[in-house]
Image (cartoon, coloured by chain):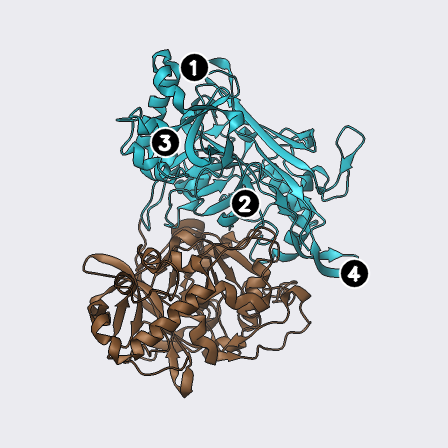
Chain colours: A cyan, B brown
Amino acid sequence: VTAGSSWIEGDAWPSTALPLGVVEFDGRARPATAVGDHVVDLAGLASVGLLDGALDDPVERFSTPRLDALLAAGPTAWHGLRGRLLELVTDRGAARRMSPHVVPLAAVRPRLAWTVADYVDFYSSLDHATNVGRIFRPGEDPLPEAWRQLPIGYHGRAGTVMVSGTDVIRPCGLRPDRDGVSFGPSLQLDVEVEVGFVVGGHTSPGERVPPSAFADHVFGVVLVNDWSARDVQAFEYRPLGPFLGKSFATSVSAWIVPLEALEPARVAPPTQDPRPSAHLLPAGDAYDLDLELEIAGHVVSRPRFAGTYWTAAQQLAHLTSNGATLRPGDLYASGTVSGATAAERGCLLELTWGGRDELSLGDGSARTWLEDGDVVTIRGSAPGAGGGRLPLAEVTGRVQPAHH
Amino acid sequence: VTAGSSWIEGDAWPSTALPLGVVEFDGRARPATAVGDHVVDLAGLASVGLLDGALDDPVERFSTPRLDALLAAGPTAWHGLRGRLLELVTDRGAARRMSPHVVPLAAVRPRLAWTVADYVDFYSSLDHATNVGRIFRPGEDPLPEAWRQLPIGYHGRAGTVMVSGTDVIRPCGLRPDRDGVSFGPSLQLDVEVEVGFVVGGHTSPGERVPPSAFADHVFGVVLVNDWSARDVQAFEYRPLGPFLGKSFATSVSAWIVPLEALEPARVAPPTQDPRPSAHLLPAGDAYDLDLELEIAGHVVSRPRFAGTYWTAAQQLAHLTSNGATLRPGDLYASGTVSGATAAERGCLLELTWGGRDELSLGDGSARTWLEDGDVVTIRGSAPGAGGGRLPLAEVTGRVQPAHH
């Protein structure tokens, strides 16, 4: 399929992206795609037969305000839908029938696009893991023993994954302060720049997904802000890992960019030494995503996803290597994306070296940790078809004061 | 409400238990309660008006083969339903109208009773945590620094929670063997005896549930077998906690025993020293549950839940203390229940001291870890009304060989 230019106006979303989400307008939420400065109502298209033959049961699949049924349908349906949408949005002849279902982006409110089944967070950036080890465990080998042998990860809280734009309330917790350890608002609220992968389809107990089957199980990509209370996390995490330091909120993009749209972003992965276990090979592709972290209106970091040590395909293979099943709506994220230089670090923990160094915002103000009222926005883009850039959907949120 | 004896025959379930579950018969799965040696079809009762006035929308709430809508309804509905069921099963005059909806237990197949939203596993037994620390981290202080200040916990995989009776496939993973570290079937498959709490209703972001509000948010209790691959777990768990060593399977009882049925089991909790943070006080009640672990037909351990250091009310208060929301269907478990003596240890890791000592099964056979074909069953009971015993629903499963 070659990308044509769309008859739908605006330049926020090229017609080759066709991200999927759920938006509310006229008092009702419905699945949609975005083209130009507009959204296209998929329930509407299905209702007038414009999606017939592109996938099974289009009316039924888009009848609820979640993409769950589409995620369950699997890769043939995803491919069929994408092909049909690309035809429709680039065929001026379809404009008359499409128009009743096209609405300006500015007139809709995004909702969480799908029901998050299980949420797993990895720790796949070598620079991030090394920096965190140095900060949290000075004097020890910064990389955990198993780090180069498997993509370390853990389960997060699926019920507190929230759509971009949702306010985040500063969490309370037990953390060190001047008087020892006491319960109160986190004093070290942080952000983590991550890339998330949205899973579709089911697997059976005992089944393993090899890295080569990645695209059969992953529908697309969101940006993730894995908000973190570093003081709470540091106090609680031994030996069972992060819990309340993370579980209060995880923000994701309103729009899922399909993996198919990211074909031009595929690049060779970094070299892995030592050679991983056979079940993690071949490693699959890396994705050349340029990320950007903005805090209180100032871009503070530009991490690049392509250098992440473990690929997304390896993360999925590892996640299922013990036979754990996948469900439609499972989400897994890369862990903080950081590079070798200070300008590529994806969290304040690294940018301020555990709060030791102030981070200048360039306007005379500075941060060690997030302040109430701060808006945090993560943006991303990838190489697109024909030499252009393809945007990922941003993820943004404002910090609200703790509840007492 | 005083318990009368039921006109429904059999003695598996006293009429004061009224556990809720989902069973399949005549080709259809439906919510049910159990009395004597029978189940009572709640969708059936609702359809003929027998639940009218006991809770809102009874037909709608029991229209799907999951208890999700009942869990969402909250404590007033739970109480109303329980009161009505107790009337119906103890009133011989109701027998004629009830009978079409009463089916022998032996004729039904249990299904997973509810959709598990998020699953959290705690680490609340002092004896268990101390033993594990000694085995996994010899030479260090066995109790993690924060252990006496907060109930340590982490998120598990909700999608692999399975109903009692489901086979468990031995997981594969990276673990040490004679040749170093390689990928293969776990050589140290273990069981964990736990008590699980099923949450109903929602909370709002930033809201905390104090221990005193425990009964407004917890519908009831299941037994939990948190199957564990100790070799996989030991290799992977630093620094983000258990992941693949646990995520392949967690088994739960087919029947949820309502918290209201466990009123007679409430006892004073153990002394906590140092005094916990104010948000974890007052501690709430402990529950006097006697547990029993059977492996391959032999009872190997009898842990007692009453001595668990952190109460279930404190676990819930901690889980929400950072403002994380609850959803209907959230499940949290106590962590392995172990007592001070070897006969009260709730997992093979402790019973065999990390595989060092064989555990005799009493018939000449012995185990260090689970073998393929082993059936593991956890049973439990509590003081009931009027001096009798109230059963909890057992959780059982057979180990199947690894998939290669």
Task: Using the rendered view, name the quadrant where residue B358 is placed.
Answer: bottom left
Residues at marks 3 and 2, common chain? Answer: yes
What chain does mark 3 sit on?
A
The residue wearing badge 1 is A6
Q: Which mark is residue A179?
A: 4
For mark 3, give the secondary structure.
Answer: helix
Q: Amino acid at mark 3?
A: Ala
CA distance separating discs 4 and 2: 36 Å
Callout 3: 10 Å neighbours few (<14), some, many (20+)? many
What chain does mark 1 sit on?
A
Q: Amino acid at mark 4?
A: Asp
Residues at marks 1 and 2, common chain? Answer: yes
- In the rendered image of this protein, does residue B330 appear above or below residue A216? below
Q: Earlier in the sequence, mark 1 or mark 3?
A: 1
Q: Which residue does the image show at 51% across and 17% down from the upper left?
A: A10
CA distance separating discs 1 and 4: 62 Å
Q: Earlier in the sequence, mark 3 or mark 2?
A: 3
The residue wearing badge 2 is A147
For mark 1, give the secondary structure.
Answer: loop
Where is the N terminus of chain B found, in terms of image quarters? bottom left
Answer with left or right where residue A53 lies relative to residue B260: left
Q: Position of residue B168 (x, y in %)?
A: 33, 59
Q: Which residue does the image show at 55% across and 40% down from the upper left?
A: A251
Q: Position of residue B138 (x, y in %)?
A: 59, 65
